[in-house]
Image: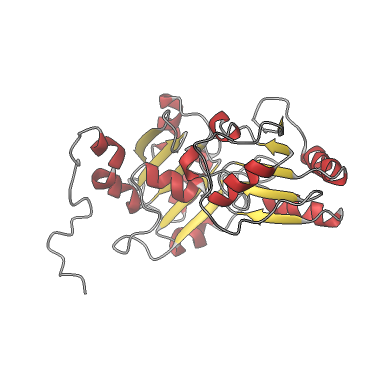
Amino acid sequence: MTDSLVLPANDWPEFQPGWVWLCGAGPGDPGLLTLHGLNALSQADVIVHDALVSADILNWAGDRAKRIDAGKRAGRASPKQAEITRLLTDHARRGKRVLRLKGGDPFVFGRGGEEAQDLVRNGVPIRLIPGISAGIGGLAYAGIPATHRDVNQAVTFLTGHDPAGDTPPLDWGAISRGSQVIVIYMGLRTMSAISQALQEAGRPADEPVAVVSDASLPTQRVLETTLEKAAQDIRQAGVTAPAIICIGKAVLMRQVLDWQSMASGAPPRNSDPLGLTTAPPRK
């Protein structure tokens, strides 16, 4: 852990030997790691991390900490879930302080619940440390609020694939009717089927869509498109994982809230993307 990263005075929890702490590292920007996460890094003996956890975050660990890459990436040989659980259990039973560090929030489509359940079944004590999910923090870095009272009173978070890698068998009609904004994790490969299902359920073909890849990182890219054209534009633009997809009018708020462009001196594209200039004053 570098000398410049000193935790403020507080009664921080002590990482006991034989425990596993499951911690979210946030969507990518090291500054979005929580203080509890930083505390965990400073004490851990073993860090079992995902591929999405950056080297900048891992460098904040103690010098003695053993780092184990257990990242899963499509198309590459990667550890099975049972292997990861066995790895965590074995190190904990040897009296090590084991940090399981996962991108985003481990409990939002991150299999954190599965791993925690298996550890408890194996008699391993755990602590859960949530992180900033890409479906909220990643969109914010693109200038898209997950909720806006002039846009939506509900937001639905869903995964773009089922355990077999296919389009999830969801009630698309209910999702279409019940949520003005839809946020999709891991949906690049199945976006064509999802787009078709939502349009058949009544969502307009020209509904705004944003695809945010490498959210919160210097390599972040944002593709703005429509529901009808999303899958085609994703292919043509060469968008790659990790990416988060947002469907709904909240995407229009990027025209005025693209704070990263404003930081570079660019003015907002549209100060009133929802056309609310004639709306009555808020109470």
The answer to whether residue 35 of the structure is visible from this angle is yes
Q: Residue at x 61, y 47 (%)?
A: 39
Q: Is residue 283 left or right of residue 190?
A: left
The answer to whether residue 227 of the structure is visible from this angle is no
* Nearer-the-camera pick, 281 or 91: 91
Q: Is residue 253 left or right of residue 176?
A: left
Q: Position of residue 58 (x, y in %)?
A: 60, 33
Q: Is residue 109 left or right of residue 241?
A: right
Q: Residue furthest bottom?
A: 283
Q: Position of residue 10 (x, y in %)?
A: 55, 57
Q: Quadrant of the N terminus?
A: top right
* Nearer-the-camera pick, 249 or 267: 267
Q: Residue furthest left?
A: 278
Q: Is residue 61 left or right of residue 85?
A: left
Q: Quadrant of the C terminus?
A: bottom left
Q: Position of residue 135 (x, y in %)?
A: 48, 48
How many numbered marks are there? Answer: 0
Which coloring applies here?
Answer: secondary structure
Compared with 187, 201 (above or below) is below
Q: Quadrant of residue 227?
A: top left
Q: Position of residue 73 (x, y in %)?
A: 64, 30
Q: Residue at x 83, y 41 (%)?
A: 91
